[in-house]
Image: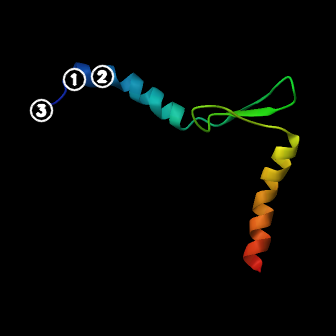
Amino acid sequence: MSEPTYEELKAGCPSSKKKKAQAHRLAEFRVGEKGGVSVYGLGRFPVTLYYEQWIRLLDVPRIFATSSRE
């Protein structure tokens, strides 16, 4: 296997920078028409949760904390 040329390395730089930027991108939140909050950037597809689901999800750390103390 031969080593890449300078031109090949230079041409590959923008795509690798773009991939790194996408990997370190923060999650993006959007509110839908029906009141659901969609989170983009966690995976391939957005995750949409409604108010009751957010409350249950945000209670999880508290539940773990109380169960670990027992």
- Give the quarter of the image for residue 17: top left
Q: Position of residue 3 (x, y in %)?
A: 15, 30
Q: Residue at x 79, y 33 (%)?
A: 37
Residue 49 bears which disc, if any? none
- Give the quarter of the image for residue 65: bottom right
Residue 1 bears which disc, if any? 3
Q: Quadrant of the N terminus?
A: top left
Q: Which residue is mark 2?
A: 10
Q: Residue furthest left?
A: 1
Mark 3 touching mark 2, by CB under 8 A?
Answer: no
Q: Quadrant of the C terminus?
A: bottom right
Please give left or right for residue 44 compared with residue 28 in the image: left
First of labels 3, 1 by sequence position = 3
Q: Residue at x 79, y 65 (%)?
A: 63
Q: Which residue is mark 1?
A: 6
Q: Residue at x 47, y 34 (%)?
A: 20
Q: Amino acid at mark 1?
A: Tyr
Q: Amino acid at mark 2?
A: Lys
Q: Position of residue 16 (x, y in %)?
A: 40, 29
Q: Position of residue 41 (x, y in %)?
A: 62, 34
Please give left or right for residue 42 compared with residue 70 in the image: left
Report helix, strand or loop for mark 2: helix
